[in-house]
């Protein structure tokens, strides 16, 4: 597409999100398709932000959706200016893992944190919060890595 507009890109982004939703519900075990689709959603979200900035000067509203904005952050929106030679970066660590034995992972987390763990998601969340995301630092039988990608872009 030559000189794509933010509106054209957002249409593609919506279509990519719809395909992601379809994969999640109809083929949740297809890791290769899921990773490819997530990559497409991320690519289009970044492309949307770039086009939006070029067209209007506004930043990407999807660029930092995981941060909890405080009232002070909202009041200071647009006032963050990096120090000379400074740069704001967003880093995504995308991993696709398989948990071959859910019970083993849950037991590991329960022993590590001395409290009950209800499911795999809670176990992984607890490990991430305690250690950051480092799946290679745990016993080999807990995770099987199906791929990892570090994505970084400046805001």
Image: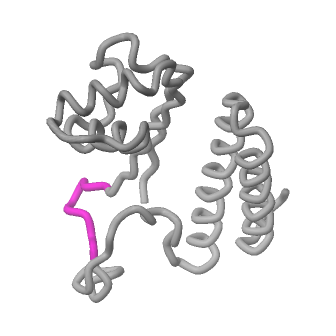
In the rendered image, residue 51, in percent from the top left (x then y), is placed at 65, 66
Quarter of the rendering containing residue 87: bottom left
In the rendered image, residue 17, in percent from the top left (x then y), is placed at 72, 58
Query: Relative to the observer, which residue lies in front, 103 or 55?
Result: 103
Quarter of the rendering containing residue 48: bottom right
In the image, residue 40 sits, relative to residue 123, either above or below, namely: below
In the rendered image, residue 121, in percent from the top left (x then y), is placed at 42, 42
Image color mode: one colour
The residue at 30%/39% (across/down) is: 128
Quarter of the image with the N terminus is bottom right
In the rendered image, residue 69, in percent from the top left (x then y), is placed at 31, 75
In the image, residue 1 sits, relative to residue 98, either above or below, namely: below
The residue at 37%/21% (across/down) is: 104
Please check the rendered image and state whether residue 82 is part of the magenta-colored stretch, yes or no: yes
- Please state if 2 lies on the left or on the right of 62 as rendered: right
Residues shaded magenta = 80-87
Magenta region, main secondary structure: loop
Query: Relative to the observer, which residue lies in front, 44 or 24?
Result: 24
The residue at 56%/71% (across/down) is: 53
Instruction: Count how many numbered circles sit on residues in the image.
Output: 0
In the image, residue 65 sits, relative to residue 108, either above or below, namely: below
């Amino acid at each position: 597409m030559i000189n794509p507009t933010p509106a054209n890109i957002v249409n593609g982004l919506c279509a990519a999100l719809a395909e992601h939703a379809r994969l999640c519900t109809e083929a949740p075990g297809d890791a290769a398709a899921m990773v490819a689709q997530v990559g497409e959603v991320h690519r289009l979200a970044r492309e949307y932000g770039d086009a939006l900035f070029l067209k209007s000067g506004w930043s990407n509203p999807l660029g930092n959706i995981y941060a909890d904005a405080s009232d002070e952050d909202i009041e200071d929106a647009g006032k963050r200016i990096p120090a000379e030679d400074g740069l704001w970066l967003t880093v995504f660590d995308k991993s696709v893992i398989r948990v071959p034995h859910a019970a083993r992972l849950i037991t590991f987390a329960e022993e590590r944190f001395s409290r009950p763990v209800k499911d795999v998601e809670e176990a992984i969340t607890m490990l991430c919060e305690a250690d950051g995301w480092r799946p290679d630092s745990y016993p080999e039988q807990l995770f099987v890595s199906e791929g990892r990608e570090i994505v970084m872009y400046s805001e």
